[in-house]
Amino acid sequence: MTINTKLIAAIFLLAAAPCLLTSCHSGDKGKATDADSTAPAPAPSVAVAVIAAQKGKLAASLQVPGELQPFQQVDLYAKVNSYVKKMMVDVGSEVKEGQLLVTLEAPEINSQLAGAKSRIAQQQAIYLASKANYDRLLSTSKTPGTISQNDLDQAEARKNADLANVEAAKSASEEITANQNYLEIRAPFSGVITARNVNLGAYVGPAGKGSDKPLLVLQQQSKLRLVISIPESSTGGLSTKDEVSFTVRSLPNQKFTAKVARLAGALDEKLRSERLEMDVQNPGKKLLPGMYAEVNLPLPSRDSAFIIPKSALVMSTEKVFVIKVVDHKAQWVLVQKGGQAGDLVSVYGDLKPGDMLVKSANDEIRDGQTVNDKPASAKP
């Protein structure tokens, strides 16, 4: 009976062995599958069209805002304390250089001038007397022992001092005459009166009420200055030979041209831009000072730039790059963007003429990914 029990147990174990072995192998196979699923799959190959990188010049332009300013502008003030006697012009008056604009009145100046002339006459009389005395002593001194040398020297010194007093009196009179000339305010150049801040009888001058405001403002409008500021990246190649075109809002259907006349030669510390000025002839006075203009500025072209389609440049938040293809592998190449004209853009970077670049690039084409590249002109 004991033998039969052992025999039955052995038969049972033999029957269960294949099932145990199958279960073990199934578990190992499941573990291997899980391990394989966690390994990163290689990026699939993508088909791309490529173009050859070439150097060239890009005729680009920059749109910048500008402001029209009078070529010359002056604020006219009263030099001396006085009253406004006559106003010959008003706002909008066109004046010529040297034309009388305002006549002022200061009665005390006339009195000062009369006193100065009297002092001149007085000093001249004293001088003539001292000179005559010196001449007599000089003539008498020719007889030995009549006039001492000391008396002659004192007479000469008195004569010279009186002559100096005459010259001083004349200088004082000229100063008063110069102040009197300030009572007539004339136009320093031809232009248009654009502001008037006084009326007849107003007290004006350095100490007058409202002396912080000019009597008149004169602007030259037949010739204007177009002032613009260009960013640092666009400077370096402009010269006074370059010509720009611009438009203004009040005359949208007209285009004006001007030539660069002055370059600041330095960057503004706050805006990091360079100031440019153009001279604009304005004979018909269609353009007015203070108008804003939209300026089309031609940018300088550089032979060291690579000209590529805009679609070949990738501009992400972190970097700007193009994708170069080497041995069917994608390589990201960092570049700097230059000017742009239409669908073309200039770039600067570690590139060589003839390098194959992806024509329609994007950041989904990863660095090092295998690509199936074909020339852009080839048909699929």
Image: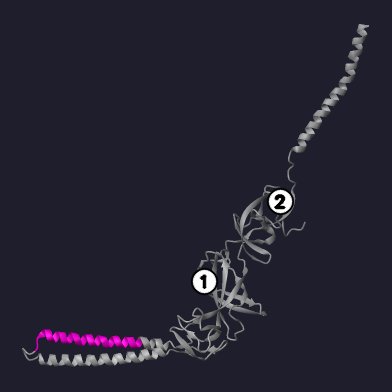
In-front residue for pair 43/364:
364
Residue 308 in picture, x, y percent from top left: 66, 61
Residue designated by label 1? 263
Residue at the spot x=85%, y=25% of the render?
22
Label 1 element class: strand
Element on which disc 2 rests: loop
**Residue 357 left/right relative to 192:** right
Q: Crowdedness of circle 1 by 10 Å Cα count: few (<14), some, many (20+)?
A: some
Q: Position of residue 126 (x, y in %)?
A: 23, 91
- 311 in relation to 124, above or below: above
Residue 42: image quadrant is top right
Residue 102 visible in rendering: no
Estimate the x, y position of residue 81 in percent, counting from the top left.
44, 84
Residue under label 2, please give it: 365
Q: Residue furthest left?
A: 145
Instruction: Give the image location of residue 15, x and y in percent.
Output: 90, 19
Which residue does the image show at 39% across and 87% down from the upper left?
178
Left or right of 155, for residue 309 = right
Q: Which residues are magenta?
A: 147-174
Amino acid under disc 1: Leu
* Dominant secondary structure, magenta: helix
Query: Which quarter of the rendering shows the C terminus?
Result: bottom right
Q: 271 or 341, which lies in front?
A: 271
Q: What colour-coding does the image apply? A: one colour
Up the image or down, 360 lies above or below 29; here it is below
Residue 111 left/right relative to 351: left
Q: Based on the displayed image, in which of its 4 quarters is residue 221 positioned?
A: bottom right
Crowding near the residue tagged with mark 2, few <14, some 14–19, many ≥20 C-alpha atoms within 10 Å: some
- Vertical arrangement, residue 63 with respect to residue 24, above or below: below
**Closer to the camera, 265 or 242?**
265
